Image (spheres, grey):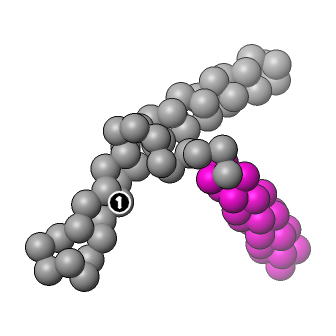
């Protein structure tokens, strides 16, 4: 039972940290970079936003950070 409680606490903490990071990165401009696609469907009621360049940049950043962490914890 303690392991489930610990898992839920850690998951909640990670969700809070992720939310704060997303909020801070949106102020910097992540999500509105050139190459991020945004269009409205023919009806005009549905907007579609596909942040391709933002996700590539975020993926590269996380890859570097995770590799640095693994390098120091060998």
Question: Is residue 42 shown above or below 15?
Answer: below
Residue 33 falls left or right of residue 2: left
Quarter of the picture containing the C terminus is: top right
The image quarter containing residue 12 is bottom right
Total label count?
1
* Viewer-proximal residue among 22 and 13: 22
Please provide the residue range marked out in magenta.
Answer: 1-26
Q: Residue furthest left?
A: 42
Q: Is residue 22 left or right of residue 39?
A: right
Asked if residue 47 shows in the view, the reply is yes
Instruction: Identify the residue position indicated by label 1 in the image.
Output: 49
> Which quadrant is the N terminus positioned in?
bottom right
Residue 51 in the image: state x and y as whole percent: 40, 49
Q: Point out residue 13 in the picture as x, y percentages from the top left corner.
A: 81, 64
Q: Is residue 72 magenta?
A: no
Q: Residue at x 50, y 50 (%)?
A: 31
Q: Residue at x 53, y 28 (%)?
A: 60
Q: Nearer the viewer, residue 9 or 62?
A: 62
Query: Could one spot residue 7 in this view of the protein?
Result: no
- Which residue: 69% across, 28% down? 65
Position of 28 relative to 1 (above/below): above
Identify which residue, 62 or 21, lies in the foreground. 21
């Amino acid at each position: 039972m303690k392991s489930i409680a610990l898992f839920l606490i850690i998951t909640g903490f990670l969700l809070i940290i992720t939310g704060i990071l997303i909020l801070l990165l949106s102020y910097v401009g992540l999500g509105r970079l050139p190459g991020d696609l945004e269009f409205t469907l023919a009806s005009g009621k549905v907007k579609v936003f596909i942040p391709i360049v933002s996700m590539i940049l975020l993926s590269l950043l996380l890859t570097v950070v995770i590799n640095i962490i693994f390098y120091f914890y060998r």
